[in-house]
Image: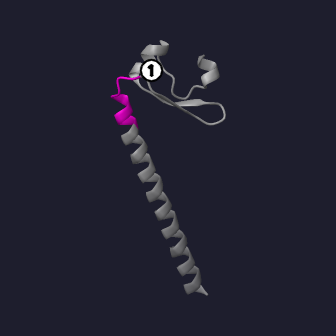
Amino acid sequence: EKNRKFTNLRREARGVSDLNAEVSQEQRTRESLYALLRQAPAPIAIVAGDTLTFEFANAAYHQMVARIELVGREYCDVF
């Protein structure tokens, strides 16, 4: 009984570790993409969710819309 519980616990811990690795990889991929988009001369913004919340806006986009900070704000609140 104790061995089975320990085995299940190890299996769950391994699952959590795998999930953390996937999340970390996704975060690294997103940051790499954002780093590339920050350098783009074209205005680029990324919005997400039902409320169209800004997740990213490069300097060219900020200049185009004459706004200082957009990230975290909803599209309808900005425009």
Residue 73, picture quadrant: top right
| Image vertical order of residue 70 relative to residue 10, above or below | above
Estimate how packed mark 1 is, as few (under 14), some (14 to 19) or many (20 or more) residues with alpha carbons within 10 Å. Answer: some
| x and y, in percent, of residue 3 in the image | 55, 86
| x and y, in percent, of residue 53 in the image | 59, 30
Residue drawn at (42%, 15%), measured in percent from left and top?
63
Residue 61, picture quadrant: top left
Q: Is residue 73 left or right of residue 57?
A: right
| x and y, in percent, of residue 33 in the image | 39, 39
Q: Which residue is mark 1?
A: 61
Q: How many discs mark residues in the rendered view?
A: 1
Instruction: Out of 73 and 75, give the one closest to the viewer.
Output: 75
- Please check the rendered image and state whether residue 40 is part of the magenta-colored stretch, yes or no: yes
Q: Is residue 75 left or right of residue 35?
A: right
Q: Quadrant of the C terminus?
A: top right
Q: Quadrant of the N terminus?
A: bottom right
Q: Identify residue type, mark 1.
A: Tyr
Label 1 SS: helix
Residue drawn at (41%, 53%), measured in percent from left and top?
25
| Image vertical order of residue 63 relative to residue 5, above or below | above
| x and y, in percent, of residue 7 in the image | 53, 80
User: Is residue 67 among what the camera can see?
Assistant: no
Residue drawn at (62%, 37%), measured in percent from left and top?
49
Q: Is residue 69 left or right of residue 41?
A: right
| Image vertical order of residue 66 relative to residue 26, above or below | above
Residue drawn at (55%, 70%), measured in percent from left and top?
12
User: Is residue 55 among what the camera can see?
Assistant: yes
Q: Is residue 1 left or right of residue 61?
A: right
- Please check the rendered image and state whether residue 55 is part of the magenta-colored stretch, yes or no: no
| Name of the residue lying farthest toward the right | 50
Q: Which residues are magenta?
A: 34-42
Residue 9, picture quadrant: bottom right
